Image: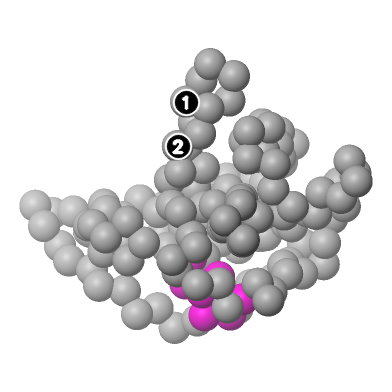
């Protein structure tokens, strides 16, 4: 498991109609804060501030097709114009188990990335796909 030290948040938030909203810098719109959205927004900031990933190379809630089904990846990072990393975010109370790993592996059928990350904000696991094998990593790679 990888421990993430999240940077100090610099989010724009607002309260409207009794609901908390956060401005998503990637989607350029206000999003209602849910437990999963809170994890996603913090992880996005960590990717940019700690791992050096340019925001312009990050897609949030990227729609993909898995067979005949339309699905949405929480975070897709691109490198050299190709998908490089998928991040699946869950709310903190959700256990990162085999079902979550299967979910991200299904997304990878169409994207074919090198790195798969699953996180619930507290616990994070990273995997590298190389030569048809999947290997658990001890840290998330830098973008360089």
- Which residue is found at the position 35% from the left and 51% from the top? 34
- Circle 1 Cα neighbour tier, 10 Å, few/some/many (<14 / 14–19 / ≥20): few
Majority secondary structure in the magenta region: helix
- The residue segment tinted magenta is 44-51
Q: CA distance from mark 1 to mark 2?
A: 7 Å
Residue on which the image places disc 1: 70
Q: Quadrant of the N terminus?
A: bottom right
Q: Which numbered disc covers residue 137?
A: none
Question: In the displayed image of the protein, which residue is found farthest to the top?
Answer: 68
In the figure, residue 27 lies in which quadrant?
bottom left
- Which residue is found at the position 70% from the left and 41% from the top? 112
Image position of 78 (left or right of 137): left
Q: Quadrant of the C terminus?
A: bottom right
| Element assignment for label 2 | strand
Image position of 38 (left or right of 139): left
> Above or below — where is 48 with respect to 16?
below
Question: In the displayed image of the protein, which residue is found farthest to the front?
Answer: 80
Marks 1 & 2, CB-CB < 8 Å contact = yes
In the figure, residue 26 lies in which quadrant?
bottom left
On the image, the x and y values in percent for residue 46 come to 53, 73
Image position of 15 (left or right of 105): left
- Circle 2 Cα neighbour tier, 10 Å, few/some/many (<14 / 14–19 / ≥20): few
Residue on which the image places disc 2: 63
Q: Earlier in the sequence, mark 1 or mark 2?
A: 2
Is residue 47 on the magenta stretch? yes
């Amino acid at each position: 498991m990888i421990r993430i030290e999240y940077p100090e948040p610099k989010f724009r938030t607002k309260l409207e109609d009794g609901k908390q909203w956060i401005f998503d810098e990637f989607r350029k719109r206000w999003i209602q804060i849910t437990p999963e959205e809170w994890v996603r927004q913090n992880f996005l900031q960590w990717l940019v501030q700690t791992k050096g990933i340019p925001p312009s190379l990050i897609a949030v809630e990227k729609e993909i097709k898995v067979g005949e089904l339309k699905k949405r990846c929480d975070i897709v990072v691109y490198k050299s114009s190709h998908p490089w990393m998928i991040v699946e975010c869950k709310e903190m109370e959700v256990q990162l188990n085999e079902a979550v790993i299967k979910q991200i592996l299904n997304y990878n059928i169409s994207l074919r990335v090198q790195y798969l990350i699953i996180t619930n904000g507290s616990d994070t696991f990273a995997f590298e796909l190389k030569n048809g094998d999947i290997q658990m990593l001890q840290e998330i790679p830098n973008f360089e």
